[in-house]
Image: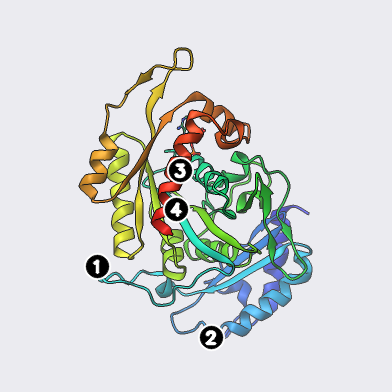
Amino acid sequence: MADTELAAQIKAALANVDVPGGGDLASYSGLSEIIVTPSAVAFAVAVQPGMEAAFGPVREAAIAAAKDLSGERKLMVSITSEKQNTPKFSHGSPQPQGKTRVKGVRRIIAVGSGKGGVGKSTTSVNLALSLAAEGLKVGMLDADLYGPSVPKLLGIEGRTALRDDGIFQPHEAFGLKVMSIGSMLVPGQAVVWRGPMATSGLRQLLRETDWGDLDVLVIDLPPGTGDIHIGLFQQTIVDGVVIVSTPQDLALIDAQKAIDMLRRMSVPILGLIENMSYFIAPDTGNRYDIFGTGGAERAAARLEIPFLGAVPLVMSIREYSDDGMPPLVAEPEGTEAGIYRQIARTLLIKVA
Ligand SMILES: Nc1ncnc2c1ncn2[C@@H]1O[C@H](COP(=O)(O)OP(=O)(O)OP(=O)(O)O)[C@@H](O)[C@H]1O
């Protein structure tokens, strides 16, 4: 059945669910779009602050109504209230209340960037593999719900397994346990997540996955500073965030915005990685500092955060990554692998 057809059928079934105050769920204004993927059905119900408990039975009834139609797909139904997802910033004060750890996961390192395309996912994957190379049990969560690229980078094929108890079984790739919404989509499918839904989608990927026993979970964040970041940092203890930036000034201005948000939310910043820092010519091996030298290092000093290292712009990083074979796996003893491993060791010391 086409995804749109199934979404329409589920919506029709929600007409049988009553909502507090009268009316039915299908015509309720707070009902989100119904997202159908080959392995999941997701929708959210936005309610007035304080009405969450009253809508608890609505959620149960919605799940019951959609269950049979959804078949094998995982049902992700969430009640959201805007106010809960709005950060209560009070300059500089910590926000620890309500933050919890993820079951079985000792440490979380998140990788973010001010803007897209700076190589954040490539860096995340290679750092995760570097941590595994240090003998740690490592997981990787692709939180970039809008543009998941981790399955491609790690050559993951096939859908995420959903167990009978409704828990996701992560993929195994090169020794990592990997979870991504990307492996629930058909190639080329775009999913439009609305704010609160993205937050609860990520929460489920994070909390309803059987990670087993992990020393470190690396989270590849979406670029920028949006609902997903705020939701994650409000609900989960993140041991530190790494910011990836390219040397161009513009990207650093964006990185600064990300750093400001982390400070306001009292999330530890582990430091800045400069990606595509200099160019290594494939024929001669010569180094060219095409963007000048030391930009990110100076920016890190200005922002008062540690500088973690510089990764060069190397054709092989892109080629290997495109083939689903990260440099850490393709050339574990290569120069680039060495750079990632050095950065990973620094991170380990910081979160130890
Ligand atoms: N150091 C590097 N040298 C060469 N190519 C690189 C390097 N880092 C990343 N790339 C390439 O740049 C492109 C963007 O990388 P990537 O997908 O990791 O960026 P991103 O910041 O996660 O992007 P998005 O925010 O859109 O998800 C990819 O084609 C990747 O292979």
The mark lying in front, picked from 1 and 4, is: 4
Q: CA distance from mark 3 to mark 2?
A: 38 Å
Question: Compared to 36, does 22 lie above or below?
Answer: below
Q: CA distance from mark 4 to mark 3?
A: 18 Å
The mark lying in front, picked from 4 and 3, is: 4
Point out residue 261 in the picture as x, y percentages from the top left corner: 32, 59
The local secondary structure at tag 3 comes to helix
Residue reaching furthest left? 302
The mark lying in front, picked from 3 and 2, is: 3
Q: CA distance from mark 2 to mark 4?
A: 41 Å
Which quadrant of the figure contains the C terminus? bottom left
Tell me which label, 2 or 4, sits earlier in the chain: 2
Tell me which label, 4 or 3, sits earlier in the chain: 3
Q: What numbered label is drawn on residue 53?
A: 2
Q: Amino acid at mark 4?
A: Leu
Tell me which label, 3 or 2, sits earlier in the chain: 2
Quadrant of the image occupied by residue 319: top right
The local secondary structure at tag 1 comes to loop
Q: CA distance from mark 1 to mark 2?
A: 32 Å
Which residue is disc 4 drawn over?
A: 348
Which residue is disc 1 drawn over?
A: 92
Which quadrant of the figure contains the N terminus? bottom right
Point out residue 48 in the picture as x, y percentages from the top left corner: 45, 79
Which residue is disc 3 drawn over?
A: 120
The one nearer the camera, 262 or 9, is 262
